[in-house]
Image (cartoon, rainbow, N blue to C red):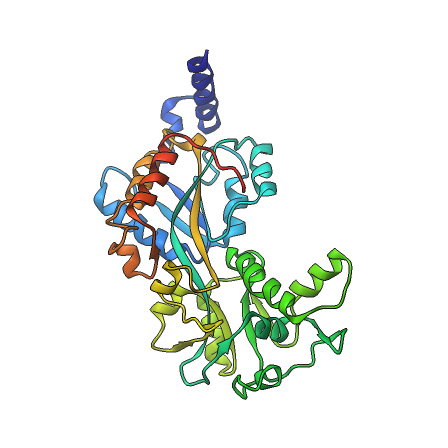
């Protein structure tokens, strides 16, 4: 009975691609989109995969943000839909429900390493030793002053804390389409908001007070980190929010801030010392495995020590690697068909 059910499911997927097996193979290139943080790692793997497996086309990798990638993955099953969504944030329960409502019932998560969110200025600017509360007070639309919420009065970092540089406040943060923003909101704004000591208010009002950015000196970047970098280049006072790997690639022009006294490095993130770090992952549409050629081999190649392991190609590109045992366990879970369940 179980074999019959699996066979029926496979036929349904083939039907979504085309009426015959030949039509099912009309798309023979893996389609990947999503996180701008994961984009450079995924692009490297795709290129190396194309070189190592000449029988397959090189996967097509695009950006668009974690939220956009997951939305595309969840649009349905079939030739015109995405195979893999890169993400720097976990798929939420509501996102998974959206997948399931559109017939995308087999979603598999693959965690391949770690990254940190860093705060960087132009290399000629002052040194920043930041705490989450500093960033909250710089960014929030309203802040507590003498026990009351008021429109943000701060124009200079030294007004927030005398230890900070005498530098105008201007911050470029990721837009809401980015997984980086979700982690930024949780680890920075919510943490800083709690430390700031807001007056008592309803839960919805508290969330808005913590997470609503001001409009005068904060810009939300919908594009990738190159757009954030351009903001810093055009405004010497700006602070930008980046992934560690992008900062590493541009450290000749950028200076990174410490957060809670910890400098973001591969070692401090791997050890869990740097407070603004997160896992990196991608989500695979199980229904496309065996229909779009190469997906299983691509996953195995991505999780190999050569690519994602310690001393591998992705570490050289800025990834904080997971252990070989962890990567092997991720591959086993994927091959076993373990479906993603939000925590």
**Residue at 25% from the left image edge and 48% from the top image edge:** 305
Q: Quadrant of residue 151?
A: bottom right
The percent coordinates of residue 127 (x first, y second) are: 45, 82
**Residue at 40% from the left image edge and 68% from the top image edge:** 264
Count of numbered tags: 0
Residue 22 in the image: above or below residue 213: above
Q: Is residue 283 visible?
A: yes
Q: Quadrant of residue 134?
A: bottom right
Residue 321 in the image: above or below residue 266: above
Q: Nearer the viewer, residue 130 or 340?
A: 130
The percent coordinates of residue 287 (x first, y second) are: 45, 30
The percent coordinates of residue 100 (x first, y second) are: 57, 33
**Residue at 37% from the left image edge and 47% from the top image edge:** 60
Residue 296 in the image: above or below residue 276: above
| Quarter of the image where the C terminus is located | top right
Q: Nearer the viewer, residue 326 or 218?
A: 326
The percent coordinates of residue 201 (x first, y second) are: 77, 62
**Residue at 44% from the left image edge and 13% from the top image edge:** 4
């Amino acid at each position: 009975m179980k074999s019959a059910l699996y066979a029926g499911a496979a036929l349904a997927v083939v039907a979504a691609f085309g009426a015959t097996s030949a039509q099912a193979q009309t798309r023979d290139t893996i389609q990947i989109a999503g996180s701008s943080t994961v984009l450079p790692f995924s692009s490297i793997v795709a290129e190396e995969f194309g070189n190592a497996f000449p029988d397959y086309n090189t996967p097509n990798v695009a950006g668009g943000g974690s939220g956009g990638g997951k939305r595309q993955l969840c649009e349905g099953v079939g030739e015109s839909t995405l195979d893999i969504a890169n993400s720097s944030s976990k798929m939420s329960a509501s996102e998974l429900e959206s997948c399931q409502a559109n017939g995308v019932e087999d979603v598999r998560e693959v965690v391949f390493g770690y990254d940190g969110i860093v705060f960087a200025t132009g290399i000629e600017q002052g040194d920043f030793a930041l705490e989450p509360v500093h960033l909250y007070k710089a960014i929030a639309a309203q802040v507590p002053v003498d026990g009351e919420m008021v429109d943000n009065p701060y124009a200079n970092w030294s007004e927030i804390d005398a230890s900070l540089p005498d530098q105008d406040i201007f911050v470029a943060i990721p837009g809401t389409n980015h997984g980086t923003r979700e982690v930024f909101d949780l680890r920075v704004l919510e943490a800083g908001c709690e430390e700031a000591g807001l007056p008592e208010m309803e839960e919805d009002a508290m969330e808005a007070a913590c997470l609503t950015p001001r409009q005068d000196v904060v810009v939300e970047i919908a594009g990738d980190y190159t757009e954030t970098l351009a903001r810093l280049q055009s405004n010497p006072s700006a602070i930008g929010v980046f992934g560690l790997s992008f900062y590493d690639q541009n450290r000749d022009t950028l200076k990174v801030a410490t957060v809670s006294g910890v400098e973001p490095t591969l070692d401090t993130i791997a050890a869990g010392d740097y407070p603004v770090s997160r896992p990196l992952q991608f989500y695979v549409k199980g229904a496309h495995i065996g229909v779009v050629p190469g997906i299983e081999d691509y996953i195995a190649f991505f999780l190999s020590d050569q690519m994602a392991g310690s001393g591998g190609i992705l570490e050289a590109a800025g990834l904080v690697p997971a252990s070989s045992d962890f990567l092997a366990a991720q591959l086993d879970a994927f091959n076993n068909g373990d479906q993603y369940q939000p925590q």
